[in-house]
Amino acid sequence: MAFSYMPGFGNDFETETLPGSLPQGRNSPQRPAYGLYAEQLSGSPFTAPRGTNERSWLYRIRPSVRHTGRFKAEKYPLWKSAPNVGDHELALGQYRWNPVPMPKEPTDFIAGMRSITTAGDVLGQTGMAAHVYVANRSMADDHFFNADGELLIVPQVGALRFVTEMGVIELRPGEIAVLPRGLVFKVELVDETVRGYVCENYGAKLTLPDRGPIGANCLANPRDFKTPCAWFEDKETPCRLIVKWCGQFHVTELDHSPLDVVAWHGNYSPYKYDLATFSPVGAILFDHPDPSIFTVLTAPSGEEGTANIDFVIFPPRWLVAENTFRPPWYHRNIMSEFMGLIHGQYDAKEEGFVPGGISLHNLMLAHGPDATGFEKAFHADLKPVKLDNTMAFMFETRFPQMLTRYAAEVETRQDNYIDCWADLKKRFNGTPEGDWS
Ligand SMILES: [Fe+2]
C-alpha cells in the first residue's frame, strides 16, 4: 500500500479518509459526521505567539481518554533521561564507537532504544538525549507516546514504517522523521533488522533556521518536508499503550487500537524529509563557513542564536576553496557535538569513524582531523573535488552531553580514539616556512 503525504513545513494541513469526515467552518460541531469525537492536540500553550502556536484538531472513533486505562509501571532500563549523571566510571574524554550491536533477542523499536548521552533536564523541558535504536521486530499491538519530547529519527540500516495516529510515515536511510511530543504511534519494520539514531528533544520544537543573507532559498526548503495524510484502523482487539513521562515508563491495556483518527486539520503534525533535497551552501573562493551553514533543523533555547539542538548534516558537495585547509579545522566548542555516519566516509576522519558509528566531542574538548587526514589535506592538489557518497550528521546542543553507563561499557566503544591525533607532529622550527616535510 502506498501512503501519501502533503508538502510543506509547519503548514495548516487538512486531511480526511472518509468524505465529509472533516468538519468545515468550525472545529467542534455538536455532532461530528460518522459519529466521531472532536479532540484538540496542543503542541504549544494556548496563548503562544501566532508564529509558534501549534495545535491540531483530531476527529476520531474514540476520544483519547478511552485510549488510556489504569497505568502500571514499565521498565526500559536502557532508555535514559537527563539528568543522568555519574552512572559510570569512565573519565572525561573524546569518545568514538563502532556501531551498536544488533539485538539477538526479538526486540521492537521501543525496547531497542539505547541511550548514549543525555543533556539538560527533562523536567525543566531543556536539553536532549541522543539514542541509537536497534530492532528486529515490529510493534503489532503495542503503541507508544512520549510526553518528554519530540523524536527526531535518523535511520542508518533498514526501512521502517511509523504508523501514527495522524498518518503513516515510511522511512529509509537517507531520510529523517520528526514525531511531535505526545503523538501516539507504533513502528513496523519493512526490513528484517533496523538501526538508526534518535534525538529526543525535551525543549522547544525543531524548526527551520533563519537564512539571513542567504535569502529565500537553499539549505532545507519547506516544500521538501512531507506530512502524512490521515490514516486509521477500526480494530477491536487487545492492544497496549506505553507512555514515557518525565523519564519513567508506564503501560496501559486497551481493547482496541488507539490509531483511530479518521480526519484531522492543524499545524501540529509529524513529518519526514529526504536529506538528498538539502541544498548546501559553502565557500566558493577560500576558507569555509562554520558547520552551522549545514543546519537542517534547529530547536531554540530561549537565548538568541544558542540552540537547544541543531541538527546538522555533512552532505555530498564540491570542495573548491583555493589555498585552504579543506577539512574541518581544529576547534574547541562551547556546544557539545554528537556525530553519526549514515553512509560513506566523513572528511575529517580517514578511518575509524564507520557507518553506524558515533563520535562525541563534548563542551570545550578539542578535536579535528586525524593525523592521516591532516597529512592528506596539506599535501592535497587543490583542484575542485566532489566529496561524494557520504552523509554524516551532528546533534549539537548548548548543554554538555553526559554519557550513559551503556555507552561507557558497550564493547563497541573504541579505547584508542584519542590516538588518532598522536601523530600530529610539531612543524614549528623557528623559520617562516616551518617544517612541512
Ligand atoms: Fe566539532
Image (cartoon, rainbow, N blue to C red):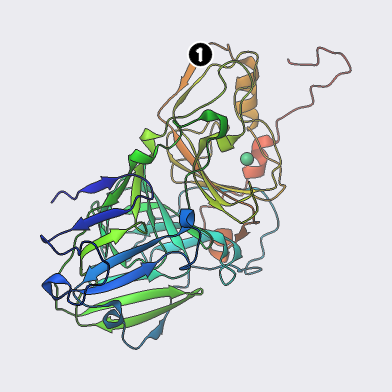
Q: Residue furthest bottom?
A: 70
Q: Which image quadrant: the C terminus?
A: top right
Residue 70, above or below 272: below
Residue 420, above or below 14: above
Q: Nearer the viewer, residue 6 or 148?
A: 6
Report the residue marked by disc 1: 384
Residue occupying the point 67% across, 43% down: 418
Q: Is residue 179 among the parts visible in the rendering?
A: yes
Left or right, residue 402 beside residue 251: right
Give the secondary structure at mark 1. Answer: loop
Left or right, residue 330 beside residue 231: right
Residue occupying the point 52% across, 68% down: 80
Percent x, y of residue 374: 64, 26
Give, as a three-letter code, the residue at label 1: Pro
Q: Quadrant of ligand 1?
A: top right
> Based on the displayed image, in which of its 4 quarters is residue 100 positioned?
bottom left
Q: Residue furthest front?
A: 25
Q: Nearer the viewer, residue 375 or 24?
A: 24
Q: Nearer the viewer, residue 428 or 362?
A: 362
Percent x, y of residue 49: 50, 59
Q: Is residue 106 among the parts visible in the rendering?
A: no
Residue occupying the point 43% across, 30% down: 279
